[in-house]
Image: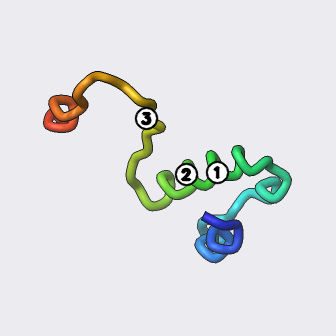
Amino acid sequence: MNNKLLYLIGTEERPIHKAYQYLSGTHQSDYARAYLMYYFGGGYTDTKHTHIDWNPYFKQL
């Protein structure tokens, strides 16, 4: 997601924090994910390579 898109999503009721522009790219990405989940719902996971089958866990959801 680029910065312009996040600023288009932000409104007076859902403001983007003033310090966002000063965050590193990594922190901006973290902020954007949290912002979108907070205001629009959803979930996020940062998965790593594993040898475990995830399907049984997804079926429990």
Q: In which quarter of the image is the N terminus?
A: bottom right
Decide: few, some or many residues near mark 2? Use Cα within 10 Å; few <14, some 14-19, many ≥20: some
Residue 35 versus residue 12: which sits nearer the camera? 35
Could you tell me the amino acid type at mark 1? Ser
Rounded to the nearest angstrom, the CA distance separating label 1 from label 3 is 16 Å
Do the numbered discs 3 and 2 sit on residues whose CB atoms are within 8 Å?
no
In-image side of 14 versus 28 (left or right)? left
Q: Where is residue 37 in the image (x, y as percent from the top left)?
A: 47, 53
Do the numbered discs 1 and 2 sit on residues whose CB atoms are within 8 Å?
yes
Q: Residue lying at the far bottom in this picture: please name it.
A: 8
Q: Return the disc, 3 or 2, that comes first in the chain's sequence.
A: 2
Q: Residue lying at the far right in this picture: please name it.
A: 22
Could you tell me the amino acid type at mark 3? Thr
Q: Where is residue 60 in the image (x, y as percent from the top left)?
A: 15, 33
Which residue carries the number 1 mark?
29
Rounded to the nearest angstrom, the CA distance separating label 1 from label 2 is 6 Å
Q: Quadrant of the C terminus?
A: top left
- Residue 19, above or below 4: above
Q: How is the image coloured?
A: rainbow
Which residue carries the number 3 mark?
47
Which residue carries the number 2 mark?
33
In percent of the image, x 62 and y 46: which residue is there? 30
Residue 26 found in image quarter? top right
Could you tell me the amino acid type at mark 2? Arg
In-image side of 56 versus 2 (left or right)? left
Q: Return the disc, 1 or 3, that comes first in the chain's sequence.
A: 1
Q: Where is residue 27 in the image (x, y as percent from the top left)?
A: 71, 45
Circle 2: element type: helix
- Residue 1, above or below 20: below
Circle 1: element type: helix
